[in-house]
Amino acid sequence: MPAGLNRALLTVAGAIVAVILAFVICSVAIVAAGGAPLDAFAAFFDFGPTERAQMNGVAALIDRAIPLFIAGLAVAVGFRMNLFNIGVEGQYRLAAICAAYVGSTFVAPPVIQIAVIIIVAALVGGLYALIPAVMKVTRGVNEVIATIMLNYIAINLTSYLVRGPFSGQKEGQLTTTTPELPESAMFPDLNFIFGWFGLPAPTRAGGLWGFLLVAIVLGVVVWLVLERTRFGFNIKASGLNGPAALASGVGPKRMVIAAMVMSGAIAGLIGLPEILGDKGAFNSNFTAGLGFLGIAVALLGRNKPVGIAIAALLFAFLDRAQGALQEANVPASVVTIIQGTIVLLVVIANEITKRLALRLEERRAAEQLGTNAPAEVAA
């Protein structure tokens, strides 16, 4: 078996074992909370009593996974260079409100209107991520500390903007909000896909958000850039060994700035699925915490777009079950416990499988050297 395939199978097996162990451990937590594990796990697969309700549940699951997937990609770009961009939370909130406000100030054909909103969001996210990058390469400020502090600034700045300069609240509204986007800014939904299978279209929260297509394209682009271009190789080389990369002509400082800006630009898109697919504005109840969840999704997906997509779907599946768990008299916080346990166990499983794969490759290389056959070692 090729070394690369062997390592991939070990990785998948480790992740599956980690997820199973997480559910076993969480069964203990459910029993301790006074619930029944079988009822809780049945609630995870309860998508509703009617076909329409089930389609709403499926659309809600995929809609939840879209921003989580984008958040995971943003964090993974930083991780690729050993940069911990903890500031994704602040970057996406600031980008979302700026994009929503700019998009509400003009009316243009849908293609232009949506393209401008996406560009504004990416620019704001990228420029905000540029701050900790410059601080790191010029003054040596740790990016974790810088991005955490910038999160607080961005969150409070966003609260001020939505209540002040960017406010478009109408009389009688309970939540503060930016001005509503024109119809040309709303991304068309993908509800017609359900019709292909003879199923009723979902009716809740804008149905299946069309931004799913943008997320898929984004995932492919990120994979191509990181895995198939010199830029991606330079990022990985700089992250693995900065001095060696510098000796080979790669500027580590330049790559730090490039990686952080790219991570921030992707982070800027996290809030757009909700704005362009459902809300039509940024309001004070806008979904929070996606940036922090993106860290867990990226870790679980091992910083690979395909793995991140699977991790985002798993987290969305767990999040969707919170309501059903409460109906089954199981605390909704069980979901958070499961998510944390899965991430912890997957990190441990990754380390074990990595060492196991390395040991197997060393043994095989030794055996092949003994027979004078060429040795194959995974990159």
Image: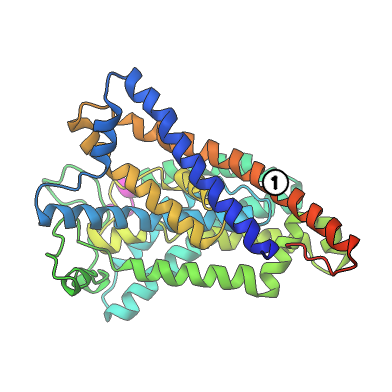
Of residue 99 and residue 55, the one placed in the foreground of this image is 55
Residue 180 x, y percent position in the rendering: 22, 61
Residue 198 visible? The answer is: yes
Q: Residue at x 47, y 65 (%)?
A: 122
Q: Left or right: 266 with respect to 115?
A: right
Q: Residue at x 16, y 53 (%)?
A: 54
Estimate how packed mark 1 is, as few (under 14), some (14 to 19) or many (20 or more) residues with alpha carbons within 10 Å: some
From the viewer's perspective, is residue 224 above or below residue 128?
A: below
Q: Secondary structure at mark 1?
A: helix
Q: Quadrant of residue 198?
A: bottom left
Q: Residue at x 24, y 56 (%)?
A: 58
Residue 66 x, y percent position in the rendering: 37, 58
Q: Residue at x 23, y 59 (%)?
A: 278
Residue 168 visible? The answer is: no
Q: Left or right: 156 with respect to 376?
A: left
- Tell me the kind of residue under disc 1: Leu
Whether residue 166 is in magenta: the answer is: yes
Residue receiving disc 1: 356
Residue 250 x, y percent position in the rendering: 80, 67
Of residue 138 and residue 236, the one placed in the foreground of this image is 236
**Magenta highlight range:** 162-167
